[in-house]
Amino acid sequence: MKKITSIIKAYLAERPDFYAYLRPQEAYFFYERKNQMKGPILDFGSGDGFFASTIFKKRFIDVGLDLSSSRIKESLKTNMYKDTKVYDGGIIPFPSQTFRTIVSNCVFEHIPKIGKSVKEMHRVLKKNGLLMTTVMCSSWSSNLKGGKLFGKTYIRWFNEIQQHNSLLSKKEWIQLFKKSGFEIVESIDYLYEKAAQQTEQYHFLSLFSLFSYAVFKKWKLFPFVSAKKIRRIENIISEDNKNPSACFFVLRKI
């Protein structure tokens, strides 16, 4: 669990606080399965590479792929990936059967026509290649505390802010993956109710971080991290076990 502690600390020091309630869990799923990841490796929706940096050594991943509107250019400064590619969200710019592993963290729910993207990932994977991904599920909406107070209007508004364009149930995600030619090797629920509500709450409490980034290009001007806060987050992550909002999948191309 020392790895989770270090990842929580990294997120509290360098990112808005709400990330600390979900990203460390996700990072640990990938970290535990590093030995299963065979190259070439594609990071689908790689962004600025910060998430990958909490798990992997520099240049462990062959290609980081994201939209031109993302922060993918920032990943060039850290030399996190051997190569980066910008694309339009349609055809993945690689030949069929290029990669043996694809990793993707909390990307799928933001894509309006996610079925097409999943089929593209199936195309560029080699036979028996692995796709490891985390996805938000529709149960996220039912866990929102604001939704319990203000109803469906709040839920729609909050999901619009989050740009959740494909918020499927776990059953629907499984159906989509199987339809696209994958078998489910492993699935793990996470981001349970209490952690989900902390994530929601800290979206509002992290407004200063958004201001700081807009003005100074830094999420945290004073990156002090208390051991007490780390322990509190660890306890919430480990003890919470009611109503999962998200799921981690390991999928194999068949």
Image: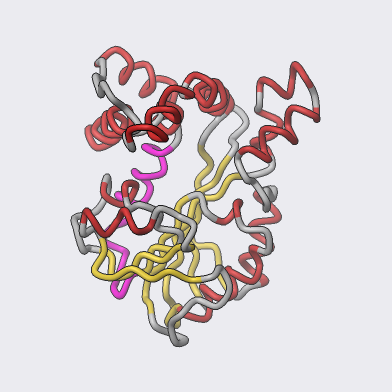
Give the vertical position of 65 relative to 208 (above or below): below
Picture quarter with the N terminus: top left
Can residue 241 be seen?
no
Residue 78 placement: quadrant: bottom left
Q: Can you give x and y, in whole percent of width and height, for residue 182 in the image? A: 56, 71
Q: Can you give x and y, in whole percent of width and height, for residue 226 in the image? A: 26, 15
Q: Can you give x and y, in whole percent of width and height, for residue 151 in the image? A: 80, 24
Residue sitting at x 53%, y 42%: 189
Give the vertical position of 182 relative to 77 (above or below): below
> What secondary structure characterizes most of the magenta part?
helix
Residue 104 placement: quadrant: bottom left
Looking at the image, the residue that sits furthest to the top is 228
**Magenta part of the chain:** 23-41
Looking at the image, the residue that sits furthest to the right is 152
* In the displayed structure image, the side of residue 74 where residue 126 appears, left or right: right
The residue lying toward the viewer, choosing from 165 and 233, is 165
Residue sitting at x 29%, y 12%: 228
